[in-house]
Image (cartoon, rainbow, N blue to C red):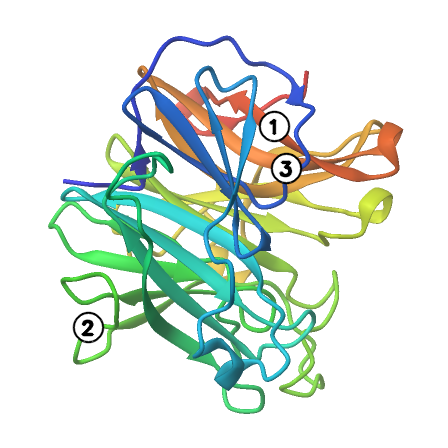
Amino acid sequence: MFVGILLAGPVVSQAQSLDVPVHDPVMIEQDGTYYLFETGDGITMWSSADREDWTREGQVFDAAPDWTTDVVPDFDNNMWAPDIAEHEGTYYLYYSVSSFGENRSAIGVATNETLNPDASNYEWTDHGKVVESVPGRDLWNAIDPNLTIDDEGTPWLTFGSFWKGIQLVQLNDDLTGLAEPEVWHSIAARHRYWKLEPRDGGDRMNGAVEAPFIFKKGEYYYLFVSWGLCCRGEESTYRVMVGRSKDITGPYLDKEDQSMRLGGGSLVVDGNSEWAGVGHSATVTFDGTDYLVFHGYDVSDDGQSKLWIEEIQWGEHGWPRVTLE
């Protein structure tokens, strides 16, 4: 059974930012090598033997799949916010096709038998669009995907950004399309001013929630999200929030029992004077220790986005917290 991304590997002490220029990172391990995927032209891939020294391995897509221009006519192959997972011997890479500030977006998926670029069977096969959002039709945005398979073996894709927040939809058995009949849930949102036009994503005071990641620990599913604004260098206001539920479909409640559908969320990690904002996190397990993988904007380096891998401290009553060190 696969739940989130469960990894195993050597013990490595990591308690600070790594000087690796990445954005929206997600990580997985295969045969002792760690692979990191991030936002970039064709999805940028990195590899590492120790999670400290990283080698850029190029990109997954040399050219954008043909279907992407049906969603975004001028799409330039800059793919956002990937998610990587292994299920029954196949690697699934979900990715976002979008235009900044619009919900003219779609999530696609590609598969591979291996993540090792030197392997003879290394080849990405694109399966096209999984789900799409259309301006004026949908009050949600099809970006920032994350795959989770629940305790009953049912696959789910969570995603979303601004508008009316984070969605959860059931996938079919091959993980490349939606289940029929479709099963949808809204699992997190923040206040959205009621006079905003449907095509308007809003700002930090109007629905700023995105980057969902569901992680199962013990009896709870934890929903990590990012609040605030990304992608603005030293002006970024990102921070990671969390809620939890015993049912993958929610409701996800914070420490104060406030529903994340109604703006609830408990702080996991925030920026500081040296890091303008930290967020877009993935939660992984290395050798029995849980880590938060995310990016932060380095004030000392003109707001450059850089990689963080930080151990999660599970505090009183099982709530996660991360401290920047």
Q: Is residue 150 above or below residue 208?
A: above
Q: Residues within 10 Å of mark 3 (few under 14, many from 20)?
A: many
Q: Which mark is residue 179?
A: 2
Residue 215: x and y, percent? 35, 40
Q: Residues within 10 Å of mark 1 (few under 14, many from 20)?
A: many
Q: Is residue 80 above or below residue 97?
A: above
Question: In terms of depth relative to the viewer, which is nearer, 41 or 282?
Answer: 41
Which residue is disc 1 drawn over?
308
Residue 258: x and y, percent? 49, 51
Residue 143 appears in the figure: yes
The residue tagged with tag 2: helix, strand or loop? Answer: loop
The residue type indicated by label 3 comes to His
- What's the residue at 43%, 47% (across, down)? 213
- What's the residue at 69%, 24% (across, down)? 19
The residue tagged with tag 3: helix, strand or loop? Answer: strand
- What's the residue at 17%, 78% (across, down)? 180
Residue 256 appears in the figure: no
Which residue is disc 3 drawn over?
295
What whole-number distance in Å separates the C-alpha atoms at marks 3 and 2? 32 Å
What whole-number distance in Å separates the C-alpha atoms at marks 3 and 1? 6 Å
Quadrant in which residue 169 is drawn: bottom left
Please tell me which of labels 1 and 2 falls first in the chain: 2
Q: Is residue 241 above or below residue 188?
A: above
Q: Quadrant of the C terminus?
A: top right
The residue type indicated by label 1 comes to Trp
| Farthest left residue in view | 152
Q: Is residue 285 above or below residue 171?
A: above
Q: Residues within 10 Å of mark 2 (few under 14, many from 20)?
A: some
The residue type indicated by label 2 comes to Ala
Q: Are marks 3 and 1 in contact (CB under 8 Å)?
A: yes
What whole-number distance in Å separates the C-alpha atoms at marks 1 and 2? 35 Å
